[in-house]
Image (spheres, grey):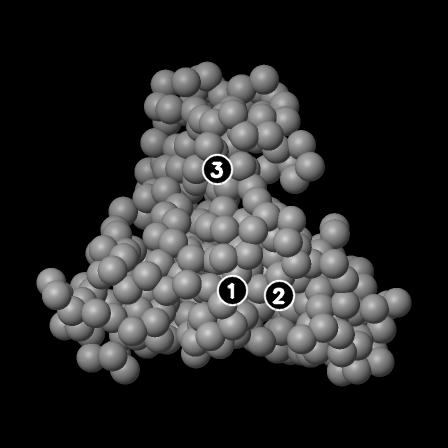
Amino acid sequence: MKRSAPRGPAFVVLVAASLAACGSSPNSPGPDSGVGATLSATIFCAQEREQTAAFSARCLGGLAADWKAYRDSYMPCSRFDELIAAGTVRFHPELAADCLRAQSADRDCSTPENFCFAKTFEGLVPVNAPCHNDYECPPNGGCWAPSEFAANACAASVCVALGDKVGDPCTTVPFCYPGIATCLKGVCVAYGKPGDACGLDSEPACGPGLRCGLADPKCVPIAPGSQCGSDFDCVGTEYCDNLQCRPRIAVGASCNGVPTGCVGWASCNEQTFTCEAAGHPGQACGSTQGDDTLCIDSFCQNNGDGSRSCIKPFGLGAACQLGRQCASGGCSDNACATCGS
């Protein structure tokens, strides 16, 4: 599943402002979040972004600075003031300190997705109503144009909700909110628990922190150095090589024969077979757990030869297919255009 803006690490997103600038450590809510204190919208956003970036770097690999820049490039914390003033988002300062504690940087890596950030910044635009930004929508929703899974200022972008509880339908959008429920035959169902059968189309996917056993197809905990069938069977800082999870390869080291083995926000150069930094304009798309779609201040483009590159958004009049390819945020009649507000 790909979204224009991950609300948390599960959207890789995950995946998503600086605590240092706020005078706080990344592992605690900070001095302004004690009992009786009231956090401002921008300070809360800054602290949550810093904590989530540190969590993502520890659990998925790569630099915390890249994870933070990834979320900031989609929407800086200062933009929340604009949305609040416009009446499309409501800030709940009474929820902020508890959310920071729930989103601590040192929480367990298999912690399921938490809606607290999107509840603290409550989107007020209802499902199926026009929108301009994911954060204007309900916690389990996104602002999407038809078939784009992202907003397009020149198309009918509306709030679309994903199923986030057992029994919700997942027919129109064929997936449920990651980490909360999984889609099976058009219905959101509970993830498989440890010991549950897995691996068949009739069985739900294993839950967060679990993988499907190879010899005995049952849900078992993901652990460092465990057996695997793919990178997603390993902890985020390891990759799957010959059915065995191994530590990811550092930037500058050889990735010959293991093209998905580089650390997060790095890519295996197909000419030199060396891991190199990725995810910034002009570089290969950044990766996490072997999924190379991450770009900062740019979008990930398939080059047609199996490689992907981060491309700066196009100017007005340039050819496009999606709104996110344009600096204006709008693509109309296959050309970048200025539309909407």
Query: Which residue in the protein does label 3 denote?
Result: 164
Inter-mark Cα distance, 3 to 2 = 22 Å
For the point 34% across and 31% down, which residue is it? 221
Characterize the local packing of mark 2: few (<14), some (14-19) or many (20 or more) Cα atoms within 10 angstroms: many
For the point 35% across and 23% down, which residue is it? 194
Q: Secondary structure at mark 2?
A: loop
Inter-mark Cα distance, 1 to 3 = 22 Å
Q: Are the two marked residues, 3 and 2, in contact with CB atoms closer than 8 angstroms?
A: no
The spot of residue 122 in percent (x, y) is: 42, 57
Q: Are the two marked residues, 2 and 1, in contact with CB atoms closer than 8 angstroms?
A: yes
Which of the labelled discs sits on residue 173, or is there none? none
Q: Amino acid at mark 3?
A: Asp
Between circles 1 and 3, the one closer to the viewer is 1
Can residue 183 be seen in this snapshot? yes
Which of the labelled discs sits on residue 132, or is there none? 2
Q: Is residue 99 left or right of residue 211?
A: left
Q: Amino acid at mark 2?
A: His
For the point 34% across and 71% down, which residue is it? 41
Characterize the local packing of mark 1: few (<14), some (14-19) or many (20 or more) Cα atoms within 10 angstroms: many
Query: Which residue in the protein does label 1 denote?
Result: 88
Between circles 2 and 1, the one closer to the viewer is 1
